[in-house]
Image: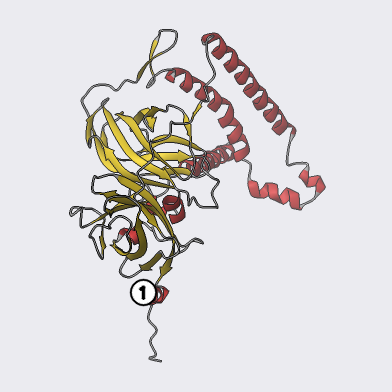
Amino acid sequence: MKRMAARLLVGAVGALMLGGVGATRATPVLAHGEAAQPAFLKEGTVAFWDVKFSSNTINLGQDLTITGKIRYLAGWPNNIPDPSLLWISAVAQGPRVLVMERWLNDEFTPSSAVIAKGTNYTFKEVLRGRSPGQYHIHPMMASKGAGPIIGPGQYVTVVDTGAEFQNNMQLLSGETIDLETYGRGTVIIWHLLVVVVVVPFLLYWLVRPLVIRAKYVGQGKEAERRLVSKTDRMVAYASGAAMMVLLILGNLVTSNGYPVTIPQQVIRLAPPPLPPYPQLASLDPYTTAVTYGPTTQTVLATLKVTNTAKIPITLDRFATASYEFANQAAHSDAQNPFTVDDPSPIAPGQSRTLKVTMADAVWQTDQLIPITEVQLILRGVMLFKDATGAEEPVEINAPINVDYKVLLEHNSARLPQHTNAF
Ligand SMILES: [Cu+2]
């Protein structure tokens, strides 16, 4: 009896450990792990700019609107399937907000949207505060084949008003339900019933000493017969039968309880195209040169720009991953500024070689330069602006020349130094 109790204890600990492995979460990293995503994925897929949050504080149950512009880059990485479907969503630390509305190109898009690379879109999403606290929230473009691609995030505080949060919805039958609590009792009861069948089955097998069973195999055919006993078979049949009864019962109870249902709808909406952006600038891809200095964390981009508009233009911003770098000459308060060697406007028809210097720690801290990847490329959108304020996003897709000599010296400086004092 004592031995049996010990075995059960070992089994229970084992079950807890198995459960624990599944439940273990990665050590929290800064924000949402954007830095851990490979550069080709975050820079080469979707560029975000003009992302705006309507507020940084909302009450519980109140709405927040995120708007912005995106481009599915034509230079989409060739190791990811071409984009075809988009589901607009948001990232927060768990289900802290609800997505109430999704809009693409000013079209209400409650379903997945048909999209294509090399295309610009505008988006809007309405989020509702669901649980009080402060959360880092990003717009997210869940793209079939590429996964969730997140845009610039911001901290949002959901203020506790003391009221209980409700997510009411009227059904087609006229009945109003609260999605927060609807069917909760049913879910709990069915989970418990399954646990009643599954946990004893798991414990029954977990208490078997594994090593002794492995020894039977080593001892040959005669001993092997002891691996699965008559009782083992009975337990398996009984558990299987109990599970079958539960499934049939579940089906009957549900179809009787909810006689009128419709299947979940699969609708794919192609948004109306955006009015085209004005043609302001072209970049010569063959003379574009990008170098990166690892110790100075500086990207130097040499771009041959031609003004294809009828009025003067300037390079205003550069959008890549969830960053929007801005020309210091026009944005003195920019969070991620860059400088242009000649900030004066480019005249219509004129071609000029611009030297753009982007000195920023985020190149390294957010691993934006794909030093360890097979495509050492800078990708994103250069935003050109004319005197009227009109803008054109122009894609850049240029190989990066990393100063490896400096990188090697930088790395060796961090290695333990040899001494010759033998
Ligand atoms: Cu975040």
| The C terminus, quarter of image | bottom left
Residue 83, horizontal then vertical, whole percent = 51, 42
Residue 289, horizontal then vertical, whole percent = 40, 66
The residue sitting at 30% across, 35% down in the picture is: 66
Q: Is residue 218 above or below residue 132?
A: below
Residue 14, horizontal then vertical, whole percent = 53, 42
Amino acid at circle 1: His
Extreme residue in the left direction: 332
Label 1: how many residues lie within 10 Å, few (<14), some (14-19) or many (20+)?
Answer: few
Q: In the visual, does 311 lie left or right of 264? A: left
The residue sitting at 42% across, 28% down in the picture is: 109
Q: Is residue 399 above or below residue 270?
A: below
Q: In the visual, does 111 lie left or right of 298? A: right
Q: In the visual, does 221 lie left or right of 6? A: right
Residue 172 versus residue 77: which sits nearer the camera?
Answer: 77
Extreme residue in the right direction: 222
| The N terminus, quarter of image | top right
Q: Is residue 375 above or below residue 189?
A: below
Residue 341 versus residue 206: which sits nearer the camera?
Answer: 341
Snapshot quadrant of residue 282: bottom left
Residue on which the image places disc 1: 410
Number of numbered callouts drawn:
1
Residue 387 versus residue 330: which sits nearer the camera?
Answer: 387
Residue 320, horizontal then vertical, whole percent = 37, 52
| One can see residue 53 in this view | yes
Snapshot quadrant of residue 153: top left
